[in-house]
Image (spheres, rainbow, N blue to C red):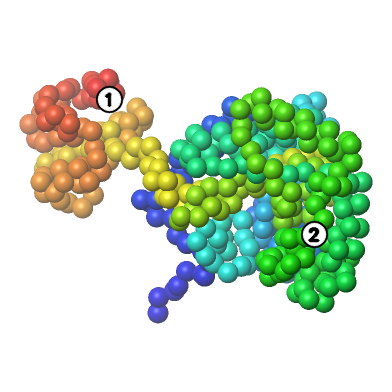
């Protein structure tokens, strides 16, 4: 019986792995430009981390987490997002005490959510995210947004739309919270069970409900913009001014609340093309209370996370081809038993010199070996047989123009590197 792959997961085969490598390479290059350093956290964490960090009123915590008990009867969860883990590491390793602040970090890795699989949404998916912890400067908000936009532009996307909002400081959010409760409470019985539970705990989550998004009260709900105090308005204004001066275009959307409980002040999403429609490629925002919620000192933070799967779909829609050179520098063709023994040694020398090289391992005839070289898109073919071994030379064929030259074994690596 053939074992099937779990629903909501997928295999990345070699033909597509090059695309993933290019995307991850670009992410690392852009993060280096912005002086963000990589952090790697465990794939599973204490369940409490996500209940406290993501928020127990979110769909993620209530419905989507892969949670299990280990042999020590501890509750563990496959990470559904990256920010909580990064902040847990920031607190646990006392990175807030280092002289270099803010701590600017990024991660790339798999996340897990139990939800209905569809295009761009899987139960195992890969996120690239960046976090800046330790600064309350509005310019760091603009920097994080600029990093995300730079990454998308560098990878080749053009149909992008940046959407901004502010959730304000705790005082502003408290005032908005009371207004939301007063707005929804008289008719809360018309909403889903989840929204009824959220009314008192976190009414902002009602605005993010997928089941009731068409309810008339959604369109008339109080806007957070109307409840921002002077400090919050001033902060948001500074972020917008910096983005304007950077030349980064954006649209304001007062309904943008994001799906996690830890956001305040700046929130943002970047939209892109997807099969003829516009979809959210990534989202992020400021989370000034998260570090203290997870046991650290009061520390401001801001970050984003994006789905590589959704990025691949957007690249496909925009017909963007990633520049992935999958060709070999050279392919060794061996003719005869002695040459077969020499080929692995010669191949190893080429590889140690930094050349991408391979040979036949299927006992193919000469014609078959050349066909394999073509399939591997080899730039040069190195041919060795009895005569070449006696002369300590190889015949090197340039596959682009068909020109052949004899080259001494001792000069072979330098010859190919110079030609390339």
Q: Residue at x 17, y 31 (%)?
A: 400
Identify the element where label 2 is drawn.
loop
Residues at badges 2 and 1 in contact (C-beta under 8 Å)? no
Query: Residue tagged by mark 2?
Result: 221
The image position of residue 333, as x and y in percent, is 17, 39
Q: Residue at x 50, y 55 (%)?
A: 277
Quadrant of the image occupied by residue 187: bottom right
The image position of residue 24, as x and y in percent, is 51, 41
Task: Identify which residue, 299 or 387, lies in the foreground.
Answer: 299
Q: Residue at x 42, y 46 (%)?
A: 318
* Residue 367 appears anywhere in the view: yes
Query: Residue tagged by mark 1?
Result: 420
Quadrant of the image occupied by residue 131: top right
> Relative to 260, is 184 above or below?
below
Relative to 19, 418 lies left or right: left
Rate crowding at label 2 as few (under 14), some (14 to 19) or many (20 or more) other CA atoms within 10 Å: some
Q: Residue at x 53, y 39 (%)?
A: 152
Relative to 382, 211 lies left or right: right
The image position of residue 223, as x and y in percent, is 80, 52
Relative to 172, 313 lies left or right: left
Rate crowding at label 1 as few (under 14), some (14 to 19) or many (20 or more) other CA atoms within 10 Å: few
Identify the element where label 1 is drawn.
loop
From the image, which quarter does the N terminus lie in? bottom left
């Amino acid at each position: 019986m053939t074992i099937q792959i779990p629903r909501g997961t997928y295999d990345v085969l070699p033909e597509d792995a090059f695309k993933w490598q290019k995307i991850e390479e670009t992410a690392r290059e852009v993060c280096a430009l912005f002086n963000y350093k990589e952090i790697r956290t465990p794939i599973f964490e204490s369940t409490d981390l996500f209940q406290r960090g993501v928020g127990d009123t979110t769909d993620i915590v209530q419905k989507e987490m892969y949670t299990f008990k280990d042999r020590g009867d501890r509750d563990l969860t496959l990470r559904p997002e990256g920010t909580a883990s990064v902040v847990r590491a920031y607190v646990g390793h006392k990175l807030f005490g280092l002289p270099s602040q803010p701590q600017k970090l990024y991660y790339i890795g798999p996340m897990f959510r139990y939800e209905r699989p569809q295009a761009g949404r899987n139960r195992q998916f890969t996120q690239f995210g960046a976090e800046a912890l330790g600064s309350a400067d509005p310019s760091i908000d603009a920097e994080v947004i600029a990093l995300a936009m730079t990454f998308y532009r560098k990878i080749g996307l053009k149909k992008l739309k940046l959407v901004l909002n502010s959730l304000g400081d705790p005082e502003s959010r408290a005032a908005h919270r009371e207004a939301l409760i007063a707005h929804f409470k008289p008719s809360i019985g018309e909403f889903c069970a989840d929204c009824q539970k959220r009314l008192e705990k976190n009414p902002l989550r009602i605005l993010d409900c997928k089941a009731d998004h068409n309810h008339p009260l959604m369109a008339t709900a109080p806007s957070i913009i109307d409840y921002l105090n002077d400090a919050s308005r001033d902060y948001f204004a500074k972020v917008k001014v910096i983005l304007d001066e950077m030349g980064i275009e954006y649209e304001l959307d007062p309904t943008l609340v994001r799906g996690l409980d830890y956001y305040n002040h700046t929130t943002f999403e970047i939209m892109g093309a997807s099969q003829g429609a516009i979809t959210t490629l990534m989202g992020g925002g400021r989370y000034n209370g998260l570090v203290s919620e997870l046991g650290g000192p009061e520390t401001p933070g801001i970050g984003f996370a994006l789905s590589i799967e959704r990025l691949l779909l957007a690249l496909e829609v925009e017909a963007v081809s990633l520049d992935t050179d999958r060709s070999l520098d050279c392919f060794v063709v061996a003719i005869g038993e002695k040459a077969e023994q020499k080929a692995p040694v010669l191949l190893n020398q080429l590889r140690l010199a930094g050349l991408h090289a391979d040979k036949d391992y299927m006992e193919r005839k000469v014609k078959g070996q050349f066909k394999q070289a073509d399939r591997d898109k080899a730039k040069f073919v190195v041919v060795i047989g009895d005569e070449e071994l006696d002369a300590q030379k190889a015949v090197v064929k340039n596959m682009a123009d068909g020109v052949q030259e004899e080259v001494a074994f001792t000069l072979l690596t330098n010859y190919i590197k110079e030609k390339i």
